[in-house]
Image (cartoon, coloured by chain):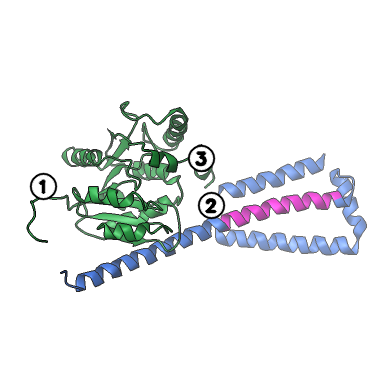
Amino acid sequence: MPATVPPPHTPDRRAWVIIPLYNEASVIAGVITDLRREFTHIVCVDDGSSDGSARIAAEAGAHLVQHPVNLGQGAALQTGIEYALAHPDCDYLVTFDADGQHRIEDALGMLAMARSEDIAIVFGSRFLDDRTDPGWVKKVVLKTAVWVTNMTTSLKLTDAHNGLRVIRRDAAERIEIKQDRMAHATEIVLELGRTGLPWREYPVELLYTDYSKAKGQSVLNSVNILVDLVVR
Amino acid sequence: MWIQILLIAAIVVLAVFMMRRTGADSHLAIRRILMGLFVIAAVLSVLFPQWLSWLAQLVGVGRGTDLVLYALIVMFLAFVYTQYRRNVQLQRQLTLLSRKLALLEAEQATDSADRTPEK
């Protein structure tokens, strides 16, 4: 590149961002562009999108891993984790949603916490403070999910279905997500809890844009999550 | 009545199977034994239709036909269950296969990108 104004700081090379991607063509480029200012390696796992999301993600500068058929977000996450772990310069994994509802500042804060306090897993939680207002229906659904998660795992979390997590390499190596569909959020907590590694929650804000509201999990989907968890 | 005990027992056994993980070999053996019993019962009922009615009365069902219907329902539930398990297994295999393919493709793309010098 020709001489430009040098960036104020260099992007993080050792924390790899993993984004499960499924039909988010209108927002994914912006999400990746913003992330690239802070992170060198963005892994986009395209889960069989039909709207050209994959091409857009690759053009925006992400590593593209493409499922040949749609498998579900949990499967995409696991694929991304395996891809990142195959690279020795990956110390931390950051899981990030494709629809732009997470704040990069939160991800950076979580990483800083993991590094400075030697924590293996940092879960983002929207319920540690009152910045996020999901609306009461969603709140009931999410709190139910938290309750089920806390019943089945050894961890006591305030928010189970938050896509923003920081996972250290040793923790990521010990988990395998088998729930392909949405129940993976609880499964990942379960498996991370089993590792016995130190974990912490970190208050994050979710940006409920009209776009993410339209795409978010419906109440009916939470029925699926519960059934997936009970019937294994 | 006997039929109630038998049906409930069948449902409970099915439920127990549903809970535990698939041990492929023992399942196959059980399926074969059940199949053998089914063949014997079917042949007997064809040869001696009154046998079925006798058995039905014995367990507290009015007619042999009703007994066949009950048996069919239990069989259907068993079928649904085995198909469900099989589906889960197939989905798992499909996931692993697709993941392998996706990772291989991504690796190849990186390799070829490394070989072409950047402008």
Q: Which mark is residue B45?
A: none
Of B37 and A91, nearer the camera is: A91
Chain coloured green here: A
Amino acid carrying mark 1 in the image: His
Extreme-right residue of the structure: B50
Q: Which mark is residue A226?
A: 3
Residue A67 horizontal side relative to residue A41, left or right: right
Residue A199 horizontal side relative to residue A208, left or right: left
Q: Earlier in the sequence, mark 1 or mark 3?
A: 1
Q: Are marks 1 and 3 on the same chain?
A: yes
Extreme-top residue of the structure: A130
For mark 3, does the 10 Å Cα neighbourhood hold few (<14), some (14 to 19), or many (20 or more) residues? some
Amino acid carrying mark 3 in the image: Leu
Q: Are marks 1 and 2 on the same chain?
A: no
Element class at badge 3: helix
Chain letter, disc 3 residue? A
Magenta extent: B66-86
- Residue tagged by mark 1? A9
Q: Which secondary structure is most common in the magenta stretch?
A: helix
- Residue tagged by mark 2? B21
